[in-house]
Image (cartoon, coloured by chain):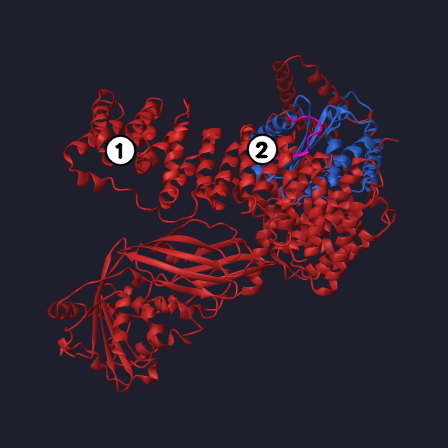
Amino acid sequence: MPAVSKGDGMRGLAVFISDIRNCKSKEAEIKRINKELANIRSKFKGDKALDGYSKKKYVCKLLFIFLLGHDIDFGHMEAVNLLSSNRYTEKQIGYLFISVLVNSNSELIRLINNAIKNDLASRNPTFMGLALHCIANVGSREMAEAFAGEIPKILVAGDTMDSVKQSAALCLLRLYRTSPDLVPMGDWTSRVVHLLNDQHLGVVTAATSLITTLAQKNPEEFKTSVSLAVSRLSRIVTSASTDLQDYTYYFVPAPWLSVKLLRLLQCYPPPDPAVRGRLTECLETILNKAQEPPKSKKVQHSNAKNAVLFEAISLIIHHDSEPNLLVRACNQLGQFLQHRETNLRYLALESMCTLASSEFSHEAVKTHIETVINALKTERDVSVRQRAVDLLYAMCDRSNAQQIVAEMLSYLETADYSIREEIVLKVAILAEKYAVDYTWYVDTILNLIRIAGDYVSEEVWYRVIQIVINRDDVQGYAAKTVFEALQAPACHENLVKVGGYILGEFGNLIAGDPRSSPLIQFNLLHSKFHLCSVPTRALLLSTYIKFVNLFPEVKTTIQDVLRSDSQLKNADVELQQRAVEYLRLSTVASTDILATVLEEMPPFPERESSILAKLKKKKGPSTVTDLEEAKRERSADVNGGPEPAPASAASTPSPSADLLGLGAAPPAPAGPPPSSGGLLVDVFSDSPSAVAPLAPGSEDNFARFVCKNNGVLFENQLLQIGLKSEFRQNLGRMFIFYGNKTSTQFLNFTPTLICSDDLQTNLSLQTKPVDPTVDGGAQVQQVVNIECVSDFTEAPVLNIQFRYGGTFQNVSVKLPITLNKFFQPTEMASQDFFQRWKQLSSPQQEVQNIFKAKHPMDTEVTKAKIIGFGSALLEDVDPNPANFVGAGIIHTRTTQIGCLLRLEPNLQAQVRLLEERASYARAVFWLWCGMGPKWGRLRSSERCVPLCNLRCPADT
Amino acid sequence: MIKAILIFNNHGKPRLVRFYQRFSEDTQQQIIRETFHLVSKRDENVCNFLEGGLLIGGSDNKLIYRHYATLYFVFCVDSSESELGILDLIQVFVETLDKCFENVCELDLIFHVDKVHNILAEMVMGGMVLETNMNEIVTQIDAQNKLEKSETFIFQSPRQDR
């Protein structure tokens, strides 16, 4: 018997729907709907109280009208009233209306919450189910506030019915998704984990979904779920297909639950050996089953079986630790690549993409290249072809780059418009990344422009010019090739741009050949001129003036062109201005001047490929899945612990102690103003990020960089970080080199610069992301552009996260960008020095410190350090020749701060006195700290030099 | 997570619309149109997955659909769902509808919107799969119907009903 008999139900509703269906036109339909809306409105507003049945009928009509795409702006109140009905049918329709159509009217939410509260307390499982559904479907913050505490109790209570448990688990999951802060972990978590052992598979499925989401954010809390999930999975996988009865779907035992369990396991690294063995058995069984003959010819059977198989393969890839399983997975996917089911081919291509990045299976994936290329050529479905392009991109390396790029290029000729731009970017990136022979690179890009010129973005053609300019071995070839390409009667404007630029720079390299003499080159370019847009024409005008410099013999021809009305009187200001200026330049400037002005372009600084950045932007952050992020966060938590160690603890046991010591000493003319105490403490508090604690030893390295700009900042067994930096006034540029010391690729390589809020306002850092994969033995470079906006005290932290083999690595080092880098030396005569010294005598403007030298004092070393620190070393200024005196200006965007510095070594006591005065007190405090760890410090008990000795000689 | 479940016919007329992520009513209608446009132009026998339209979140989402006679069943899901699993879920949904309505057809969906919603609610809750066992689902629906019947007998008197 059918569960829903067609006869009963609401007749009025059926009549209304029939009316609508009989409407001959859209207008008639709208008219009928408006009539009905008016009817319902009047019924709702009328004096006569409606019974539950009528309310239900009208609410149903409203739902139907809403489905047709009409806004419903009333009826909510009636729906809420239905919630408090004692009849199931009325209550149910009320909840349905609320779930589909709720608006954020807070008054209403309060009433709804009240009704839900009553139903949750009713202990009637049907009503509880309806209430839980409503919470899950609406999932608003107000509901989370009202029920986040209650639902865990329902979930783990012993007497809750299975169906309610199921709903409660998913309800809690929904609330956690919308308002994680309102769902605190507690005693219930361990009991939820044990739901994995529940008799009822529906409860297990719901609980697995819940735990998977919770575990991504709280891995420690749910660690025990791993072994339970493995044993549950093992029981399912090894069961005969009839064991699980209703949960067997087309001969596959509990496919959805298996998928969920495999997903849950992907939240964790490979488990410890005992559990791992059992899991490996499960995975092997799943792979084996794929080879067995199907138990049914129905597609549902193969779908369910393969859903589990693909999830198992994802887990194998995620663990990335069992070469044997990885290769088997790859072979299995290889079979699917040729399967007659399109769905399987699609999914196989997609999974292989991730497999290609594992070192164990990269080679195995590569063996399928012909199949994938074939897919690109023959698949009827664009979604599948797109996955094939993705996979080719992922499996590309030096050995097959030429083949893959060639195939992508030929596919581009017929590719769907929607994916052309992406393919263009991919080809451009692969061609650059794997170019051994740069003539091949140039050919590829020119082909790219020829085939899909419209989809070649500016970044692509800028990049080819950068590369040609930076590599002199390819310049002649590039000039020859663009010259030949320009011969085509119709060529794409992007080609004219590239051709114009390259001939302007390197046309001389082919001018010796009479077939490409200067005049022929010029005529060729100029024949395209009139077909081009304004920016291209402007570029060509620049090429012409470069020709004037390169080839004096065409000077008059070019001058004639520039002089023509169409140039000199061009309506476009930019073109006109260029024509006028270039013409003038060519007439008045001597050959020498011309040669200097139009000198060959200097090489471009190496930076991250702008194309790669563009592709990343296009693909969005989706390349990193939620899971991946969760994993990353987790590894940070595990390694870092909740409390990052104070940055400076390693080398300076009590950073604030000396300040207090100084300040507490009774007469303390040089003591810092009370307000500054906080500042100094700030210096030593670590940035409040959740990244890994600073790598051991990094503080020492950091101090080393205070007085120098280049060197190795960090090194461990895997990674070396080198720095090269330059600073001028308030600007700087730092090249960070990341060297992969292993022979294995780093994956998801993500360096991040972390500045505290305070620092962010004072120091501006700009950089581009680097390529997420770093090949074994390779080095990647990142450029950071730095601007000092205002004086600052902390240093930014460089956090590097990447995947090496199966493990996540997380390294943090302090990046030595310190205020003194913006210190410009100033020369000063003795008299000036002491005059200023005296002017800067207020306590806020002065800092002094006495400290014990860590190392024997060597005059030359000390001098070098003062210079390295950034200030000028002023000789013959201080009457005492043993003292060192320095002066400089700190440049920031907003201000300039002059600083004077004196160092008075006391050789006998090995105590040095460092005095510093600046026109800006905060800066000085910082300088202190910058110097501190390097120069050593004196604790208060060691203050042996009478304070009067600190006075400047000129004062006495 | 399942972001939305849409059922529309070959002409794009919606027959069931269920969003589990909040969108304004206008956007909901646009998403239905966009999805219909993406799905309906595809040949039969191509794969059942495609990247989601821009409105619903672009390539981070997948549309997983099946075409039965006059109706398209489309599930829009994020990357945390198994494609084949969802495909089977659609099948379970349709088989369940078939059991409940006996040879289900488009008209059943039109005239029993509330019932279809109830059946779906037994399977998917707040965007998460609640139950996949068809017998369990049908049992629940049966129980609901019994409840409904008993209420009808007790409370409802025959009347002119318009």
Which disc, if any, is residue A547?
1
- Residue B129: x %, y % from top left: 72, 43
Residue A261 located within the stretch drawn in magenta = no
User: A76 or A148, which is in the foreground?
Assistant: A148
Give the letter of the blue chain. B
Q: What amino acid is found at the position of numbered circle 2 in the picture? A: Gly
Quadrant in which residue A461 is drawn: top left
**Which range of residues does the magenta coloring cover?**
B42-51
2 and 1 marks in contact (CB < 8 Å) = no
- Residue A533: x %, y % from top left: 35, 25
Q: Is residue A836 left or right of residue B156?
A: left
- Residue A530: x %, y % from top left: 33, 22
| Residue visible at 42% across and 27% down in the picture | A492
> Does residue A406 appear in the picture of this structure?
yes
Which disc, if any, is residue B53?
2
Give the letter of the red chain. A
User: A195 or A352, which is in the foreground?
Assistant: A352
| Residue visible at 54% across and 28% down in the picture | A413
Q: What amino acid is found at the position of numbered circle 1 in the picture? A: Phe
| Residue visible at 74% across and 34% down in the picture | A340
Q: Residues within 10 Å of mark 2 (few under 14, many from 20)?
A: some
Q: Secondary structure at mark 2?
A: loop
Q: Secondary structure at mark 1?
A: helix
Which secondary structure dominates the residues rendered in magenta?
A: loop
